[in-house]
Image: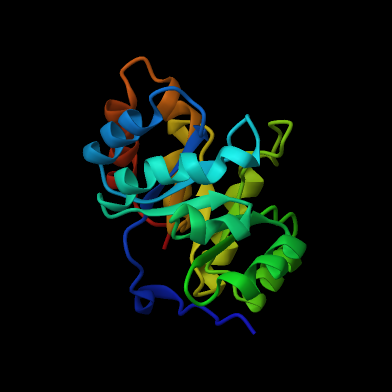
Amino acid sequence: MTTPRRSGADQGRSAPRLYLVTPALDTRGLAAKLAAALDAADVAAVLARSPAAGEGELVERMRAIAPVVQNRGAALLIEGHAPSVEPAGADGAHVSGIAALEGALPGLKPRYIVGCGGLYSRHDAMVAGERGADYVMFGEPDPDGRRPAFAAVIDRVAWWAEVFEIPCVGWAMNFDEIAALARAGADFVAIGEPVWTSPEGPGAAIAAAAGRLSVSERIP
């Protein structure tokens, strides 16, 4: 059974941290952009999205960015493709849904991180925790770019943070959502496209994202 989280002042929870999601790995100049972002702010983990060219080039492209990420103290996670984690030199995988989680766990735990998203009910989230996910994610868009209403995401994050010890990641679609997710109790706040499309560049964008975390206050 997933361990209940202590309530109130006894929780001793750490300040939330950023979880950076890359564009597809075939994006031109990604390594340099990642370096600029990771040099500008504290980032706990980087989720590398699969290249549009297909899985055949995944390991090569992951290896190209692994030193950039890991030498700056962040964990490098691969989106899906659990069998590619070890040859790619990654620190773990992020999978979507209970079936994918159950498929990934035997080959990766305990050496590697396995996080789980695609959890569309409280029951699924609890099952992911019970099965051994290192974290659960709420609010990420589906392949068509749709997700639940932000109020529903906040509700799910707040519920999880109150009850369970396993960390949760809340997905911010824009900078304005970062502080709200942190206040609700997200241990990590995921941010992706707004960092890479910012006209100020990824370094300034991730620093601004970190600033949203620093001014947030947790909901009692």
Image spot of residue 157 (x, y percent):
56, 57
Instruction: Give the percent coordinates (x, y) of residue 50.
Output: 59, 39
Q: Position of residue 169 (x, y in %)?
A: 51, 55
Screen quadrant of the N terminus? bottom right
Above or below residue 26? Residue 101 is below
Q: Which of the two residues, 48 or 177, is positioned nearer the viewer here?
A: 48
Q: Is residue 60 left or right of residue 100?
A: left
* Residue 113 visible in the snapshot: yes
The mark total stands at 0
Q: Position of residue 207 (x, y in %)?
A: 27, 34
Q: Quadrant of residue 20?
A: top left
Does residue 32 lie above or below 210 as drawn?
above
Q: Image check: 194 left or right of 115?
A: left
Q: Which residue is at a point 46% across and 80% down the rendered structure image? A: 6
Which quadrant of the figure has residue 208?
A: top left
Could you tell me if residue 156 is visible in this image? no
Quick one: 176 or 190, which is closer to the camera? Answer: 190
- Residue name at image x 31 percent, y 48 percent: 67
In depth, the one of 47 and 160 nearer the eye is: 47
